[in-house]
Amino acid sequence: MITLTPTQLRKAADLQEKIQSLQSELNDILGAEVPTPAQATEPRKKYKFSAAARAKMRAAQKARWAKIKGTAPSVKPAQTPKRKRKMSAAGLANIRAGVAKRMAAKGKAPAAKPAKKAKRKMSAAGLANIRAAQKARWAKAKKAG
């Protein structure tokens, strides 16, 4: 920007204030908002393309240039496609548990329930001992009143 003297800057500020006051006065008269030319517009949305889409666009552009220049586009040897990686069941379970935990922290979904422990089994003899002890306690309680 051009360097301005303080008096020139003051004049510019005064003019700006006059413009704003006249603009507000015009809005009052017309009863509606009149768009000012200095209003900033929203920034354009940036689009993301996948690597495959960018490769297709690049190939198409090279073909267009080759057509204009009258040369054949360079052809690369065919590549074998990469195998898709597979995730283990444990890895998938870890990811799901983490997602459920984060969602529960935000209050959007219930927390993942912990895995139930296997029920302990008691032997028949141990169960019989417990039942006998219960009967003895009840008999004592009834006797006492």
Image: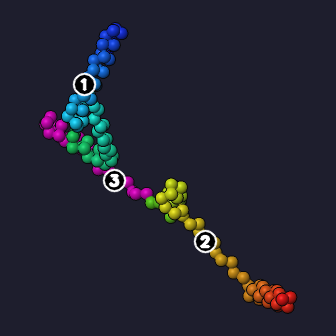
Image quarter hosting the N terminus: top left
Tag 1 residue: 22
Q: Residue at x 18, y 37 (%)?
A: 65
Tag 3 residue: 80
The quarter of the picture where residue 42 lies is top left
Q: Is the stretch drawn in magenta largely helix, strand or loop?
A: loop
- Residue 119 seen in this snapshot: yes
Closer to the eye: label 1 or 3: 1
How packed mark 3 is, by other alpha carbons closer than 10 Å (few <14, some 14-19, many 20 or more), is: few
Give the image location of residue 138, x and y in percent. 80, 88
How packed mark 1 is, by other alpha carbons closer than 10 Å (few <14, some 14-19, many 20 or more), is: few
Q: How many marks?
A: 3
- Callout 2: helix, strand or loop? loop
Is 32 part of what is drawn in magenta?
no
- Residue 77 seen in this snapshot: no
Give the image location of residue 50, x and y in percent. 33, 47
Question: Taking 26 as reference, is 52 above or below it?
Answer: below
Magenta-highlighted residues: 63-85
